[in-house]
Image (cartoon, grey):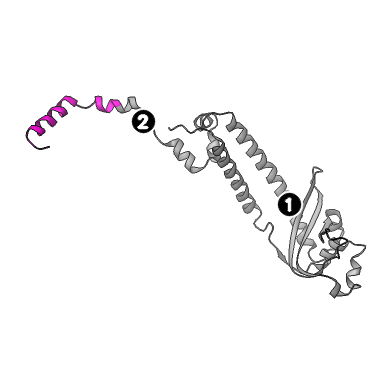
Amino acid sequence: MATVNITKEFKERVESRIRKMHHKELEAELPHLNKPQQLDAHYLYHFGCWGKDHMHLVHEIPKDWLGKIDDVQIVIKGETDEGKKTACTIRFTGVNAYKRPRDSYYMKSESEITYDDLVALPDTVLGRAEALQAWEENKQVVVLDAKWKKVESDILEFLGKCKTLNEAVRLFPTVRLYVNRDDLERLDRKVERFTERKKIVEEMATDELTAATIAARLAGAI
């Protein structure tokens, strides 16, 4: 088994592999995550962009004064079950909506809605069900993010306490799962020490071989 030192570059490769594993699990558990919904959720967009107290102005302001938009993003804000603030975004295409005029040059015309307001909307509002589904998926994302963040932290901390991958594997064989194939191939490569190689020569009839070579040279064969 060859010696594989734990360097900064090695740990960066481990970190990258762990993040890819995280991404793969997200794809497997939530295949529709962040996929746009083709639905005219203009009411939901106007609710979040204009506010429930001002969204009626969409129908009173001349349309040529407003910016039309058909591809929108709505940010849903709320708290996790543990009381931590969180947010997720859902995208709708094919929307017949209008942006709210900006109060200043630097202001962004975004659509944001709280989870409580979203739940309070009538079931008939287009996009409500999809937004609630996005929220539930986001809760799963939060759980998976926390799990993989801890995995990454624990593995990198463990490797930081080991001098070589050889030592790490002896102490915790499962660590191999987080190591790239190239590094594992280097680790598993057999290395024959010089003393072991020397035995090959010792086992040979060297005197006879030398004599045969001398005889061949005298005979003009070599």
Q: Residue at x 80, y 62 (%)?
A: 128
Query: Under tag 1, what secondary structure?
Result: helix
Quadrant in the picture for residue 102: bottom right
Q: Residues within 10 Å of mark 2 (few under 14, many from 20)?
A: few
In the rendered image, residue 56 lying in the magenta stretch gets the answer no
- Bounds of the magenta segment: 198-222
Q: Amino acid at mark 1?
A: Asn
Find residue 220 and report its horizontal and vertical position in percent. Answer: 8, 36
Q: Residue at x 62, y 46 (%)?
A: 22
Classify 133 as above or below 43.
above
Find residue 174 and report its horizontal and vertical position in percent. Answer: 55, 36
Quadrant in the picture for residue 205: top left
Majority secondary structure in the magenta region: helix
Residue farthest to the left, as pictured: 219
Find residue 156 and report its horizontal and vertical position in percent. Answer: 61, 35
Classify 65 as above or below 80.
below
Q: In the rendered image, which residue does mark 2 sit on?
A: 192
Left or right: 13 in relation to 221? right
Left or right: 47 in relation to 220? right
Q: Earlier in the sequence, mark 1 or mark 2?
A: 1
Discs 1/2, front: 2
Give 159 or 173, whichever is nearer the viewer. 159
Give 4 or 169, whichever is nearer the viewer. 4
Report the disc number at residue 138: 1
Q: Residue at x 59, y 46 (%)?
A: 21
Query: Under tag 2, what secondary structure?
Result: loop
Give 107 or 29, whichever is nearer the viewer. 107
Give 159 or 37, whichever is nearer the viewer. 159
In the rendered image, residue 204 lying in the magenta stretch gets the answer yes
